[in-house]
Amino acid sequence: MTSSAPSTQLSASARLSAAPAAYPAPMYPHKATEAQHREQRIRSFQPRRGRMTKAQAGALDRGWERFGLAIDGTPLDLPELFAGRPVTLEIGFGMGDTTAAMAAADPSAGILAADVHTPGHGNLLQFLERDGSENVRLAAGDAVILLRDMLPDASLAGLRVYFPDPWPKPKHHKRRLLQASFLDLVLPRLAPGALVHCATDWEPYAEQMLEVLGASPELENLHPEGDGSGWLEPDGHPAGSVPGYAPRPDWRPVTKFERAGLAKGHVVHDLLFRRR
């Protein structure tokens, strides 16, 4: 009987489809590594392979070897990966439309985009092909391992976390990404002057973000006076500006999750802090 071809000879999308669903996160171009498999802690995400379209799978096959990397614990050389560009880490890029727009708007800045959603990786690669962007690298897997094991100290010019899972049930709050233990991991990786930018449409999570970020003496709130827009009272009248939140910067596009939240009547808050 003829043996099957080794996995290294399969396309990226075929190897991904063959990976056991029990693995903690999708890995390209190989299966989940030992570094991820042995992690036993609570995670802030649900592994999401999902069903890829043919276009997404094709983009993965064409672009992963060039633009993708596995979160496997191997230290990264960011100056080499990004040709000397300052690098911002974006955690959770969804389907990639916002990431692609920001990359195209500023080719001089590098974006290390981490997510666990397989179709999103393929979708973002399609955008990069369309725009001809060279300043993005996609990381598949757990951002905690990426931060803890793969990024040198003071290597990041920024951190972006846009509309993370709010885990609204009280029993799930421990799964929220933005908490003190996560910040302790992030801060050493941020260079002086690095920008931390978070956004959410879930007001209790916005309050938690503000509390966690504001408690760090190593971070400076760029908008301590508030965003100037204010929250609304139940009758629709302005309640006044709430200190600590920032206006949405022009360079952050409105995201799909943001539009969905606004349609439900949610209030969107941005938070902008700078590493001292």
Image (cartoon, helix red, strand yellow):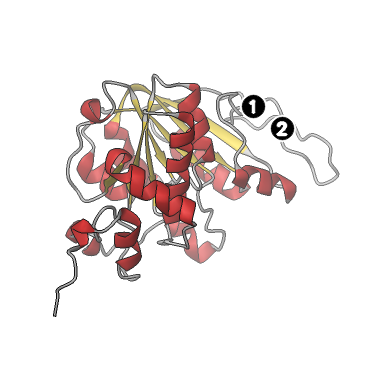
Q: Which mark is residue 209?
A: none
* Vertical position of residue 269 compared to residue 8: above or below: above
Q: Are marks 2 and 1 in contact (CB under 8 Å)?
A: yes
Where on the picture, by quarter, is residue 35? bottom left
- Residue that sits furthest to the bottom in the current view: 1
Amino acid identity at mark 2: Gly
* Quarter containing the C terminus: top left
Most foreground residue, 14 or 158: 14
Question: Residue at 23% of width from left, 63% of height from top?
Answer: 37
> 65 left or right of 241?
left
Whole-percent x, y for residue 172 in the image: 48, 63
* Vertical position of residue 208 compared to residue 132: above or below: below
**Alpha-carbon neighbours of circle 2 within 10 Å: few (<14), some, or many (≥20)?**
some
Name the element at disc 1. loop
Whole-percent x, y for residue 251 in the image: 55, 25
Amino acid identity at mark 1: Asp
Q: Which residue is mark 2?
A: 230
The answer to whether residue 32 shows anywhere in this view is yes
Where on the picture, by quarter, is residue 32? bottom left
Marks 2/1: CA distance? 7 Å
Q: Which residue is mark 1?
A: 227
